[in-house]
Image (tube, rainbow, N blue to C red):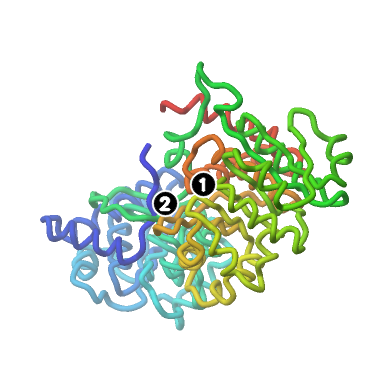
Amino acid sequence: MPARRIHTVAEIAAADQAAIAAGTPGSELMERAGAAVVEAIAERFSVRPVAVLCGPGNNGGDGYVVARLLKARGWPVEVRALSSPQTPDAQAAAALWDGGLIALDAPLQARLFVDAMFGAGLSRPMNGEAAVIAARLAGKPETVVAIDVPSGLPGDTGAPLGPVVRAGLTVTFHAKKPAHVLLPGRSLCGEVIVADIGLVEAGGDMMENGPEYWLPSFPWPNALSHKHSRGRLVVISGEAWSTGAARLSARAGLRLGAGVVTLLSPTEALSVNATHLEAIMLKGFDTEAELEQLAADVDAAVIGPAAGVTENTLVNVLALARTGAALVLDADAITVFRDDPEELFSVLDVDDVLTPHAGEFERLFPGLLKEAPDRITAARRAARRADAIILLKGGDTVIAAPDGRVCVNAHGSPWLATAGSGDVLTGFIGSLIAQGMESFEAACAAAWIHSEAADLHGPGLISEDLPALAANVLRRLYEGRDL
C-alpha cells in the first residue's frame, strides 16, 4: 500500500487542471466525484429520504450529480440550493437534475443530508442560510455526508473561520487535505474516505503517518544481529528525587529494540535507579566532561525527562552535542534554553529530534504557533530554524524535517493524556535512531507505535503500560512487513 499523501487545496486544484489539460473534461471529473460519494453512501446507509444541499460552485455541482445518481437508484431525493450554479461544470450538472428544487429554509425532514454547499477552498466565514443550516444539523452529524470537507472548514488549516457543518462521513478526492488530519477539522469530518477520480499523483512533501511510509526501513534484526549491532542508546537521569521519567524512556528504548540501553545517572541518584533496573545498564557521572566521555561512542542520547530546568541540564545537552550522537530532546532539555534558543540551535544537527508540546514549542519559538496559519506550517518553520527534526506533540502530532518533509500523526490516542507518556515516546524515538533508522522516519514510526499501543489498552492506561503494549504492535508490524 503506497504512503498516504496530504495535499493542499492548491495542489489538488493543480491536479484537476492537469487532468483537464490532458483530456479529461471537468464535467467527467465531477461525475466521478459524485459517483464516489454515492457509492460511499450506498455502502453505509439503507435507502432513505435524502436532502442534498448545493452551493454555487463545483462542490455544489458534485451535489447535483449525487442527487441524480441516488434518484436513479430509487432513493427519495430533494435538492436545496443556496443559489444558482456559478461555474460551467456546476451549471451542466444542475441542468441534468430533473427533480426540482426546495427552498433552503423549508423544514428539514430528510433522514440523510449531503453537504455540498462549500468545498475546501472557502476563505471566508459562512453566513446567511448556510450558517443557519449548519446550526440546524449540528446535533446530528451521523446523518450528514460532506463532499470534500464539511462546509465552513478551510481545507488548508482545519480551523473554521465561523459556522461549520459537522459530518459523520466525509468523501474527498485523490488525497486528504490538512483539514482532514489537523484538529479541530479532523473531529468535524467524521470518517474520511479518499476516492480515486483518476488524477495523477504529483508528489508532495506532506504525508499522513502510517506504517506504509516507514515500515520498509524499520530496523528488524536478522540472524547476524547481536546486541551491539542493534544500537547503543543512553538516557540521562534526573536528580535522585526525579528519576522515574528517565527510566520510562530507557525501558521504552529497550522494548523497541535498542540492543544496549544505559541510564547515565548523577552519582547521588545511582542507588535509587539501581533498585529499579534490570536489563538496563547504569553508569554514574558528576560533571559534563564525565557525561561526554560516557556518551562518546553511543548512537543516540535522550535527555530532558525530569532532567530539571537547571544549569546542569543545559551544560549536559551541550556536552552530548559534542559527542556526535543523535540527540532526542524533550521537556526540561527544551525549556532550559528558553532564554537563548539560538544557543541550542547552534549545536543541533539535522538528525537531532526535538519533541515539544505546544507550551515548550512556544518557549523555543515564541509567537510562531500564533503567527502560522496551522500547525504544519509552524512545525515546518521551526524545523528550518532549528535545523533539526521537530515533533510537535498533540492530538494531531506533526513531525517536520528541515528539508520540508512533514508527516501528521492523525490517529493520536486520547488515552495518552497521562503523565509520562511523552517520556515513553522519547525512548521509542531514541531507540529507533540508535538502531540506524533515519531520524525523521524514526520519529514518525515512534509516534504511530505510541498511539497504537495506547489504543490497544484504552481506558485505564498508564505510561508504564506502554512499552509492553508496544511489543504487541511490533509483532503485528513484523507479521505484516512484506504485505
For the C terminus, which image quadrant? top left
Question: What residue sits right under mark 1 in the picture?
Answer: 444
From the viewer's perspective, tell me whether residue 196 is left or right of residue 234.
left
Question: Where's residue 422, x and y in %?
Answer: 68, 51
Whether residues under marks 1 and 2 lie with C-beta atoms below 8 angstroms apart, the answer is yes
Tell me: residue 414, above or below residue 232. below
Q: Residue at x 38, y 70 (%)?
A: 117
Instruction: Name which quarter of the figure residue 363 lies in.
Output: bottom right
Question: What residue sits right under mark 2 in the picture?
Answer: 207
- Asked if one can make out residue 80 in the rendered structure from this viewpoint, the answer is yes
Q: Residue at x 70, y 65 (%)?
A: 336
Question: Where's residue 30, x and y in %?
Answer: 24, 59
Q: CA distance from mark 1 to mark 2?
A: 10 Å
Residue at the limit of the structure toward the top, as seen here = 223
| Circle 1: residue type | Cys
Foreground: disc 1 or disc 2: 1
Question: Where's residue 151, x and y in %?
Answer: 43, 69
For the N terminus, which image quadrant? top left
Question: Where's residue 67, x and y in %?
Answer: 32, 59
**Element type at marker 2?**
strand
| Circle 2: residue type | Met
**Which is nearer the eye, 45 or 420?**
420
**Residue 277 got which mark?**
none
